[in-house]
Amino acid sequence: MSGAPEHFAAIEADWRPGPVEAAEFVTAAPVRALAGLFDQPVPALGVGDPLPPLWHWLYMLDRPAQADLGEDGHPRDGGLFLPPLPDRRRMFGGGRLEFRAPIRVGDLLTRRSEVASVRARHGGSGWLLLVTVRHDYLVDGEIRTVEEQDLVYKQAGIAPVPEPAGEAVPAAPTEVPTAPWTFTLRPDPTLLFRFSALTYNAHRIHYDRDYARDVEGYPDLVVHGPLLALSLLELPRRCAPERAVAAFTFRSRAPLFASRDIEVTGVPEGDRAVFSAGLPGSAPGITASMTLR
């Protein structure tokens, strides 16, 4: 992008890591663990039972060696599709998913991943690097789920970015009318720590309050973007279990913090629904739209 700092421009122009493939058998234990984290009955899953949508995030986790981690808890030098941006800070921007067929317990799940786009842009808090990663999840050669994740990177010393602007992270509803589907998420430090452990997420903003406040400039521990996205999908799972989710688009809009009750709401309208999560009476921290079968 014209006018971008040299290192941002170089990454935008030249950084294209090759595709990566991983495979893992889908087991029941992580699903039971996440159900317990959401205070839901732990399912007695057996081989052939389907995963709830988005719960494939519990598998094929990046597990770098301890010596390879940087100050923030992310891999210091690269890792899985981490751009070579000096003193980078990472945020979860949003994503799009298409659920074509269920992923089931016992499946040998293959994930094929590649960087779909890299863009430098100037936002309200300075230069950002927007990276979109595409994942195809396959069983026996058949694509079951297609996912694109939008990740936002900035450099240390810049104030936290509340919302990555621009078309690289597609718009989702900003207002949700009175919601028939709702529940309250209570992200205390224990819940955030358990989710970090379950997803092998070592980013210190989620469990080290001093680091989150004194180094990255947040007022408190930050609620994981993936946890918020999963909380949105709790609504159809709890309120319309007979419906299947066909597609899901979500966007992170502002950080949400520990020890504050988060209101998760959804409004179904036929085969579509809109969702949000945030503090009661405040602008949402995440919004989404969904297509149901």
Image (cartoon, rainbow, N blue to C red):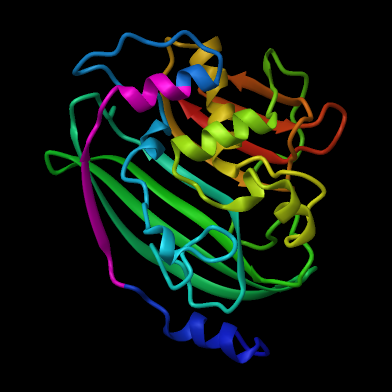
Name the side, left or right, on which 54 lies relative to 92: left
Looking at the image, is 47 positioned above or below residue 72?
above
Please, is residue 135 above or below residue 57 in the view?
below
Q: Residue at x 67, y 40 (%)?
A: 286
Q: Is residue 32 magenta?
A: yes
The quarter of the picture where the N terminus appears is bottom right
User: Magenta residues, as a range?
Assistant: 18-34
Q: Is residue 260 magenta?
A: no
Residue lying furthest right in this view? 281
- In the image shown, does 105 or 240 lie closer to the viewer? 105
Q: Residue furthest front?
A: 67
Q: Is residue 97 visible?
A: yes
Q: Is residue 237 left or right of residue 218?
A: left
Q: Residue 16: x percent and y percent?
A: 37, 76
Residue for point 42% across, 71% down: 78
Q: Nearer the viewer, residue 117 or 293?
A: 117
